[in-house]
Amino acid sequence: MWTPTAMWQWQTIGFGLLILLSRLVESRAAMRGCKRAPMPSGLDKLLRVAFLGVIAGPTCVSIDLVIGFPIFTVGLIAYMIPYTDLCEQRGGWTNLICRRAFWIRWVRQYFDVKLIKTAELDPDGTYIFGVHPHGILPIGAMTGLNYECDKDEDTFNRLFPGINLRTLAATFCFYIPGYREVLLGGGVVDAARYSATRILEAGFSLALVPGGATEALHNHPDHDVVYIKKRRGFVKLGLEAGASLVPCFSFNECNTYGVLGVTNPTINKFRTKFQHIFGISVPLVTNILPMKTKIRVVFGKPIKCPKMENPSDKVVQEYLDRYIDELTSLYNDNKDTYNTTEKPPLTVI
């Protein structure tokens, strides 16, 4: 007999199966587009159905058993249709309703987010905006670049009119129901390499945080650290698409949270393992609510990349070095103006 207890037992078994499946995901780097080859769409959809079924199925069935009508189960099955449409791999939604949402404006006001440009950008060009550092949450990238309002003069659409921007986020973020829709409504799309290539080819510009989840593990409120020396992928992507690279620095991004266990090897091992599997980090913060600060996202000068079908490692490294030099100069030129606390020189690893 199907009872709430039985449902929770099946959910426990399901979580065990997901753990085994995560081992397969890690070994093939499937969620990150290993070697630019996407996971077969059928398998991708099946994985999402299994994930949603495990985390939400038992709860929906249990509630339906209590009320005597299968409304939540039917709703869950119906939700699986848009949940598995994989639109984040093709450019996402066209109606970016969340870019004007009140909570984005509230977050911007809470952190006093401001955008500052140091160079003009051709609206007919294609760009890859690299935002540093990641911080615990990439607040500057997510609320600074993904907010549109005619009343605010420093929004991205007013500073750089004509540039159709999408922001990249880890694939696993689109597995989380509810959060997935918020991301899509804000113009956020899949960060897997094959998806990014497809979206650039469709004429969009991209914003990303090159350091990603690994950089988040280096977050410290008293020291700015950029993890980029091994991040050649976004540079190669720019060369293949002929997109200009625009370094951006989000000042005071790391001041929002304090972090525990930065030097603890056991904690770091767990966080690194989780990040390798899912592409997102699990920081241990000292404060639940983020601390107020003044986040300033400064846009640097574009680095024009020639379009090359298969750029060599030497060429990719050359443009990465140019990018790092431009980012370091951008930081040094603006740190005294926008940093709210005195910090040691920028660390690039």
Image: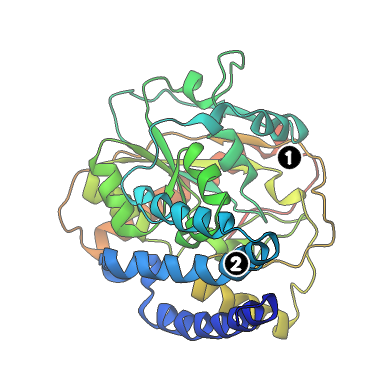
> Which mark is on residue 339?
1
Element at badge 1? loop
Element at badge 2? helix
Image quadrant holding the C terminus, namely bottom right
> Which mark is on residue 321?
none
Q: Nearer the viewer, residue 30 or 210?
A: 30
In the image, is 157 to the left or to the right of 155? left
Residue lying at 50% horizontally and 18% vertically, measured from the top left? 158
In the image, is 149 to the left or to the right of 307? right
Q: Position of residue 257 (x, y in %)?
A: 78, 54
Identified by mark 1, the residue type is: Asn
What is the count of numbered marks? 2
Residue furthest to the front in view is: 68
Whether residues under marks 2 and 1 lie with C-beta atoms below 8 angstroms apart, the answer is: no
Q: Position of residue 188 (x, y in %)?
A: 46, 44
Image quadrant holding the N terminus, namely bottom right
Q: Position of residue 335 (x, y in %)?
A: 67, 39
Residue furthest to the left in view is: 309
Q: Nearer the viewer, residue 67 or 279?
A: 67
Q: With respect to residue 8, does 101 lie above or below?
A: above
Q: Which residue is mark 2?
A: 61
**Callout 1 crowding tier (Cα within 10 Å): few <14, some 14–19, many ≥20:** some
**Callout 2 crowding tier (Cα within 10 Å): few <14, some 14–19, many ≥20:** many
Q: With respect to residue 186, does 134 lie above or below?
A: below
Q: Position of residue 63 (x, y in %)?
A: 67, 63
Identified by mark 2, the residue type is: Val
Q: Nearer the viewer, residue 166 or 91?
A: 91
The answer, for residue 38, to whether it is visible in the render is no
Mark pair 2, 1: CA separation: 52 Å
Pointer 2 or 1: first along the chain:
2
In the image, is 279 to the left or to the right of 161? right
Residue lying at 30% horizontally and 35% vertically, measured from the top left? 126
